[in-house]
């Protein structure tokens, strides 16, 4: 039996955005290296590279209201369970299995 390990890429989170204001994370402990599946990373890179992982068409940070409207709600309509905005955000911080 062969066991294949999935290699995860990482996104290093060092800043926060709230109501349009960009700032450093609250503390050094708040910095995160989030695991990203290589297939997802490849799809994101096809959209272009830039300063922000989730970005608008102009390259700036994606507004949370627009993310909800364009991405979260359509996923919910397709019956992809996200469990709410807070759960969605916290789930991204979970370690891969």
Image: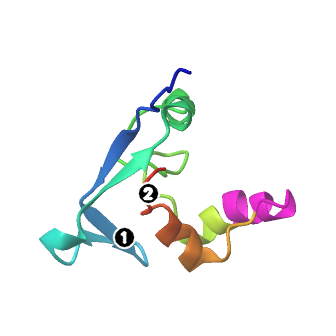
For the residues bearing labels 2 and 1, Cβ distance under 8 angstroms: yes
Percent x, y of residue 95: 41, 56
Q: Give the colour scheme shown.
A: rainbow
Where 53 sits versus 93, above or below? above
Span of residues in magenta = 69-80
Relative to 81, say whether 47 is above or below. above
Return the residue at label 2: 61
Q: Nearer the viewer, residue 84 or 19?
A: 84
Judged left or right of residue 42, residue 10 is left
Q: Where is residue 28 in the image (x, y as percent from the top left)?
A: 13, 69
Which residue is located at x 85 percent, y 56 percent?
78
Q: Quadrant of residue 93?
A: bottom left
Please state if 10 lies on the left or on the right of 23 as rendered: right
Q: How busy is the neighbourhood of tag 1: few (under 14 within 10 Å), some, or many (20 plus)? A: some
Cα distance in 3D space between marks 2 and 1: 8 Å
Category of crowding for the residue at label 2, using alpha-carbon neighbours closer than 10 angstroms: few (below 14), some (14–19), many (at least 20) = some
Q: Is residue 4 left or right of residue 8?
A: right
Dot 2: what SS? Answer: loop
Is-magenta flag for residue 71?
A: yes
Give coordinates of residue 8: x percent, y percent. 41, 38
Front residue (pair 23, 38): 38
**Residue designated by label 1:** 17
- Which residue corresponds to the image point at 48% horizontal and 61% vertical from the top-left? 92
Residue 34 lies in the magenta-colored region:
no
Tell me the quadrant of the picture where the N terminus can be found.
top right
What residue sits 70% from the left and 58% below the top? 70
Identify the secondary structure beneath mark 1: strand
The main secondary structure of the magenta stretch is helix
Q: Which numbered dot is residue 94?
A: none
Residue 77, above or below 26:
above
């Amino acid at each position: 039996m062969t066991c294949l390990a999935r290699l995860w890429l990482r996104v290093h989170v060092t800043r926060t955005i709230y109501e349009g204001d960009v700032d450093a994370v609250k503390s050094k402990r708040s910095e995160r290296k989030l695991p990203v599946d290589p297939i997802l990373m490849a799809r994101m890179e096809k959209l272009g590279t830039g300063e922000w992982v989730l970005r608008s068409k102009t390259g700036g940070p994606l507004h949370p209201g627009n993310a909800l409207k364009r991405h979260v709600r359509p996923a919910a309509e397709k019956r992809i369970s996200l469990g709410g905005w807070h759960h969605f955000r916290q789930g991204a911080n979970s370690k891969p299995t």
